[in-house]
Amino acid sequence: MTPQELKSSILQLAVQGRLVEQRPEEGTAEELYRQIQEEKQRLFKEGKIKKEKPLPEIAEDEVPFDIPESWKWVRLGNIITRNPKNSLDDCLDVSFIPMNCVSDGYRNKHTFETRKWGEIKKGFTHFADGDIAVAKITPCFQNRKSVIFRHLINGVGAGTTELSVVRTINNTVYDEFLLWFFKSDYFILNGVKSFSGTAGQQRIDKNYMTSCLFPLPPLAEQKRIVAKIEELLPYIDRYEKAWNKLEDFNKRFPGDMQKSVLQMAIQGKLVEQRPEEGTGEELYRQIQAEKQSLIKEGKIKKEKPFPEISDDEIPFDIPESWKWVRIGSLLHKLVDGTHRTPKYTTSGVPFVSVKNMSNGVLSLENTKFISKAEHEELWKRCNPQRGDLLLSKVGTTGVPAKVDTDIEFSLFVSVALLKFNNQFIDIDFLIYSILAPDFQKQCKEHTRGVGNKNWVIKDIANTLMPLPPLAEQKRIVQKLEEILPLCERLK
């Protein structure tokens, strides 16, 4: 049961007379009802309230549920007065309450602004301390914007015309009980049924507040019901906090589980190590030998030596057969796209930016286009091809995406291109390594600037990652592809 359902259930029990016991010595609602009618007649004769039109008798088929014998079904309009008027000095300071000053939900709170009575006496709803206000427009009505006014400046005020104001007859009905009734599902759901007006501007029927059926208990029982609700509220609040924590945990759990699995993978804890598969050191030397050969052949450029990895940089232990490396040392090329905005064309060569790979998948469907000539110029520096890896480096940084197309395209500065030998590095292992929490942490720590932040190429190149033997990389990927879909299903 959700906290909302629990609150609704308690209020339903309250208005049905099932929250506290009935006590014969407290009298009956019939006696209270007669007292209210006598008091209304007296106030009418004294000119303090207006005479009202008689409300229809309550038919048996209107009664929505059973109530105790000592209670009485009444129409709300027969036990209250509505929308009272204030007659005050124009210079008097009073409280002004627009709708946003009334709390929603189950709280009985409001704030106010200070105004002179002459400024707000016309065109607004009047009220005084002890009056109850109920929002009559959607969605405020469904959100339970209702309140008992307390501590108004000079005891009076005015506010939005979207409030319907109720005043009890000389405290013959307990205002707190009446407020909880206004917050009950019974009152809210029936009010919604009476809605009229255009979409977004619907209101309860103008007669709903007077014609609504109200289960009237004896006054002493009303007060005991309110006391019981207030006794239960701290427990409900504690339940709601626990519920919200659980809901938050349930929302975060699949994502946290994915992160934990990826972290285990790059720590060498997901699959066993096999001596016959060699070591990360041996693989690293193969990669460096191949790079030296390609440099001699003029196929890739010579790079500056990478900084040695110090002990205090290493974030966690890895298996002895693995090796800590800087990602740039594994790559044939690490470069970003053009730093200038090209001239766009209606068709031509796709021009890829971060938004075309924001979900981790390269999409050429909604790209901008540049001319073939401009593309060929940009291609000399940055030439993405099938089997390469893209990495977002501006804005939302650290998102990898495979190049799995033979269609030529160019890159904007917001995307980095990573080229490497797939015979030494499994591209899926590289992607999972980038998505792992430790790599993402390094990404956040080294992303620079304010607003549209930038993860510069040099910092990308110096990012640490653990390197296992190639066969183990592939076994890790296979295991991740078994486990990660299970995490997705948890969502």
Image: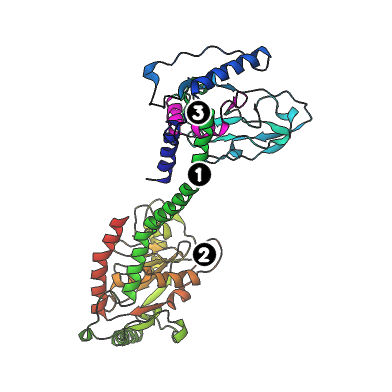
For the residues labelled 2 and 1, the Cα–Cα distance comes to: 52 Å
Which amino acid, mark 3? Glu
Q: Is residue 278 left or right of residue 166?
A: left
Find residue 481 and report its horizontal and vertical position in percent: 25, 66
Q: Nearer the viewer, mark 2 or mark 3?
A: 3
Q: Nearer the viewer, residue 135 or 11?
A: 11
Q: Quadrant of the C terminus?
A: bottom left
Q: Secondary structure at mark 1?
A: helix
For label 1, the residue is 231
Q: Quadrant of the N terminus?
A: top left
Find residue 147 and report its horizontal and vertical position in percent: 57, 35
x 26%, y 65%: residue = 483
Find residue 338 and report its horizontal and vertical position in percent: 46, 66
For label 2, the residue is 453
Tell me which corner region of the image, top left, top right, bottom left or bottom right, holds residue 344. bottom left
Task: Give the crowd class for mark 3: few <14, some 14-19, many >=20 residues within 10 Å.
Answer: few
| Dot 2 or dot 3, earlier in sequence | 3
Which amino acid, mark 2? Lys
Disc assigned to residue 83: none
Q: Which residues are magenta?
A: 165-193
Which amino acid, mark 1? Glu
Find residue 453 and report its horizontal and vertical position in percent: 51, 64
Q: In the image, is residue 184 above or below residue 471?
A: above
Task: Evaluate whether residue 310 shows in this view.
Answer: no
| Dot 1 or dot 3, earlier in sequence | 3
Is there CB contact under 8 Å for labels 2 and 1?
no
For label 3, the residue is 25
- Is residue 433 covered in magenta? no
